[in-house]
Image (tube, grey):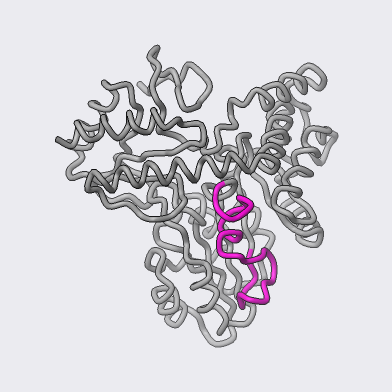
Amino acid sequence: MCPLMQSPPGAETVIDGRRYVYFAGTGYLGLQSDPEVLRAACEATARYGLASATSRSGLGTTPPLLEAEAQASAFFQTPAAFYFASGYVGNQILVRTLEGTFDAIFVDELSHYSVFDAARLAGLPPIPFHHGDADGLAAAIRHGLRPAQRPLVMTDGVFSVLGHIAPLADYCRVLAEYPGAAVLIDDAHAAGVLGAAGRGTLDYFRLTAGRDGNCGASLFFCATLSKALGGFGGILPLDQNLLDQVRARSHHYEGASAPPVPVAAASAKALELARTRPELRDKLARNVRAVKDGLGRLGLAVDDTPVPIVPLCLGTAENMQRIQRQLAADGIMVPYLPTYSGLGPTGALRVAVFATHTSEMIAQLLDSLCRALG
């Protein structure tokens, strides 16, 4: 039976009747239980009801939904945005929209399931390349692309368990040799976290969505509001021309049920707070640094990036399950993942860092882990 979460997710969370210091999940900025976000959802529910009970292509577009798109456009600094009920299908919407502009698809071998699912929709066999490896991408393109064909590269921006950042600048240098090349980035775990303004992987590498003159390829990305950005559903930040194409080619997504009204209102408020409270990202960055420095002092190999995901591969599956149980006994919740996209056969402990963790909580995590490691 799955564990039962009995409180809002946050730095402390009640699971199966016990309160834990919570280093799990994806609420990196701590917005899911922010009082302003919850208030926005409650007020929208009272005013508009739970859902519009129809599709956006019917009469289901509500003011909170439009506000969520406006706030997403302001956050990502794009002319427009398209909001839909599930972040999982963001890659699918973009692939359908871009049909006819590419001849072969190359996918990082450790990309999320949703990336591969979207690639298969194009009717082309996705060609995998070695994880995070620009030379591997170049080799895959040389072997898999015929002259004058246009490659589409698909990848996670931040890999959800490994915490690796896709080397987009290196990929752009490879793709500069191929006119018409494009990159599609699933930025679910980067949006709200990476970059000077928290806009994600492109922001981190100082690249621009669309045709980036410094890149040599067209860059497209999708995101979800359910992780750092504190709401729920998928978001496509784009320009008006691409939005028109999305609506023309992927109209069945507008024909599906519109996102629930309170969720849209909460998402709009969370996006506003993520944009206007840069101190949340600053606190998150400090906490990530403290956790990674502490793990390094314990002799564990960790990367030196601002990503708030730290996978710990500590021997056998049995050993990691033992460590997970000992942490839980100390009141620390760190999940053990036996299988997931990108993981090896033994799985990993996945530490997630939040802006709302205190220094005392981080010390508690490191002390407990030190004892568990023996």
Pick out the residue farthest to the top: 17
- Quarter occupied by the N terminus: top left
Residue 215 horizontal side relative to residue 106, left or right: right
Q: Is residue 258 magenta?
A: no
Tell me residue 126's x, y (percent): 47, 65
- Above/below status of 113 relative to 258: below
* Residue appearing at x 39%, y 55% in the figure: 304
Q: Is residue 345 visible?
A: yes
- Above/below status of 217 relative to 85: below
Give the magenta-colored segment's residue range.
193-219
Q: Nearer the viewer, residue 212 or 275?
A: 275
Q: Is residue 257 visible?
A: no
Classified by dominant secondary structure, the portion drawn in magenta counts as loop
Tell me residue 141's x, y (percent): 47, 78
Toward which corner of the image does residue 185 lie, by quadrant? Answer: bottom right
Tell me residue 273's x, y (percent): 68, 37
Tell me residue 356's x, y (percent): 51, 31
Q: Nearer the viewer, residue 71 or 53?
A: 71
Instruction: Report the label total.
Output: 0
